[in-house]
Image: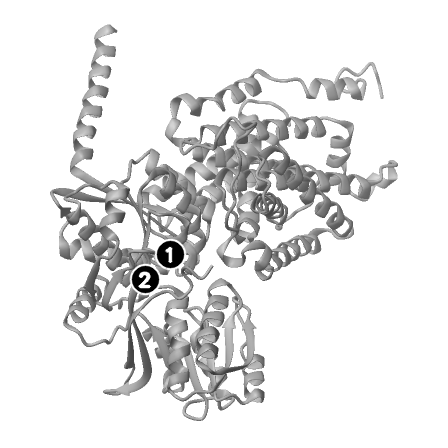
Amino acid sequence: MLGRTAAVAMLGLGTALSTGAYAQETVKIGVILPYSGPFADAANQLQAGIDLYIATHGDEVAGKKIEIIRRDTGGPAPDVAQRMAQELVVREGVDILAGFALTPEALGAAPVAEEAQKLMVVMNAATSMVTEQSEYIVRTSLTIPQVNYAFGQWAYENGIRQTYTLVSDYGPGHDAESSFADGFREAGGEIVGADRTPVANPDFSAYVQRVRDANPEAVYIFVPGGAQPAAIGKALSDRGLTPPDTKILAQGELTHPEALDGMGETALGIITTFHYTLERDDPINNEFVEGYTSANNGREPDLFSIGGYDGMHLIYETLKATEGDASGDALVEAAKGMAWESPRGPMSIDPETRDVIQTVYIREVQEVDGELQNVIIDEIPDVKDPLHGAN
Amino acid sequence: MNAANPTLGDPHVWLKRQSRWSPFEILFWLAALLPFFLFPTYLTLASQVAIVALFAISVDLVLGYAGIVTLGHAMFFGLGAYAAGIISVHGWGEPLTGLIFAGAFAGLIGFIVSFLIVRVQHLALIMVTLGLGFLTLELANSMSWLTGGADGLRGISTWPIFNQFRFDLWGYTAYSYSLIALFVGFLISRRIVHSSFGLSLRGIRENVTRMPAIGSDYKFHLRKIYTISAAMAGVAGALLTQTTNTVALDSLSFQRSADVVVMLILGGTGRLYGAILGAIIFLIARDQLSGVNPQYWYFWIGVLLMIVVLFMPKGILGFLARIAGRRD
């Protein structure tokens, strides 16, 4: 009996020692994403970006092995994200929190990162104030005001004087509406009307008719990806609201490659603003797209993939800079001001706000070799989020 | 009543006998303390299990006991969650008063809504509860100046309980707090279902047209239990807000209403422990299965649900009771 107890105790001690030694060799990254539920596709694209980076750059950095621990929120569920973050820290002993496709989930986990003093890499959630929630948050995706404020200014500078805005009635839509309008108005433009469509299953015809009646020079659109771009594209062309008579402006999701397939020719001439363009001809991007599509059965990378990919790049590079010190303070210090060439183009981390600074691309849908593509027609370099420090 | 018949006897004696504590129950509540010692790294999960169990009990009161089939009870959960969150954002983060405020608020709305609820039955009832749930969700979405909209409410900070116990990273405070709230909610519910009021509810569930015939104002009873249930769901929502310092639209979502019904079916409706058991099984299964395979854990919940519904129509607890040879 005694022998058995002693054996169990020894075994326990042995395990404790070996995990102790093991923990010194690894850097654990807890990835919190909505792998199930309505945002599962986004989560999987983001995860594929993470996987690709590890596959191409190896799973060892600064002498340490990278270990990924995934947690599903089924979200949007901030309370689950908060609990997952808590459990990853106290039970799994992760060094870095990452993922966060959705703003509420990033907000839920932020207090944990703050209290546990862990680096938290936001790989998608695009509401401006996310990075203001903790000193340990760094973002590698985009902010909605970042791409839209610059777009509003660009629209005025390129001769558009009047715009009607039509956005989905939820947080990101409201942000897009206000930031585009701010940029456009401050430059001197006039918003002649603003409408909001329901997020789920909207019928766009009535809204598009209202835009038609107002007869604006341009209409700015923000809808979530999925089925809606094709639906709104059809509603616009049914009522004759097509470029070049009426200019159509939007954030990049509207003319995402898969959405373009659904929209067909009605998409020609739509002008969008985005931080990542799949077709951007650049050696780094070409290699990224090629690696990604071959690893994912031909599925092309999107904004989620690039957020995950660059997030991992940030983690790898900061670990190199700290020579493997995975403490939150060291990593955040290393991340501040870090700049690199990403498949999306040049990007860096703002040393003051820890938010992403990047080139905003203005693209127009054109036919290239018989296929519809987002062709870059202008670039606005080094765009910061306009809202940080505004409050 | 025939006093000579030992199985019937005086109804009050019968009720008293029903409400006696069995050793199993005492054992169960002692076991609820085990996570503190055995699984100290799972306390945040345990805390959320306790919160969801309280919510499930509140739904069981109306669904399992009074027969009001509701698919919109997350409405009250969410109202409580937002009530607690909003007073915290506006400078009052004291947890206990926040809890009471949230419960009272959800109860008030429940009282108002109950007048509508008692007017309809069957399919119409399901539709009304569903519709009210969607209305509340949409209202919270559009009132983003108050609720934070799709981003969720920001800036919630819950003060330490009695200025003494901080909500720590490990979840000791959170679990203690949630468990005590669950226990109090359970005691109240237990008192209700073992009272003559509780018996009338079961009468209403079994045959609503006959209740007026024996002189029972069934609408009054239904309004009463619906209000109590709404308040309890509100308290559960407030607990979630206070222990996680977050609240967003998902607290009002249809998913939450549906999940809790799934839990009740798993555990067994019309039994308070069925609600608790269902919550434990559902959340632990979700935690474990999603750890194994984050994408497809819901598949296994579906399999489990079908097995339970096919082979244990009265839920896992009903099945266990049958095995143990105990009558319902």
Residue B213 can be seen in this image: yes
Which residue matches tag 2?
A304
* Disc 2 residue type (three-letter): Phe
Q: Earlier in the sequence, mark 1 or mark 2?
A: 1
Mark 1 chain: A
Q: Position of residue B279 (x, y in %)?
A: 51, 36
Q: Are marks 1 and 2 in contact (CB under 8 Å)?
A: yes
x, y percentage for residue B207? 77, 41
Q: Residue at x 66, y 52 (%)?
A: B129
Left or right of A46? Residue B22 is right
For mark 1, does the 10 Å Cα neighbourhood hold few (<14), some (14 to 19), or many (20 or more) residues?
Answer: many
- Tell me if B278 is positioned left or right of A344 in this view: right
The quadrant in which the C terminus of chain B is found is top right
Q: Which residue is mark 1?
A: A101
**Total numbered labels:** 2
Residue at 48% across, 44% down: B306
Q: Is residue A90 left or right of residue A293?
A: right
Farthest residue, direction bottom? A245
Disc 2 secondary structure class: helix
x and y, in percent, of residue B50 in the image: 52, 33
Q: Residue B203, image x and y in percent?
A: 76, 36
Residue A211 tag number = none
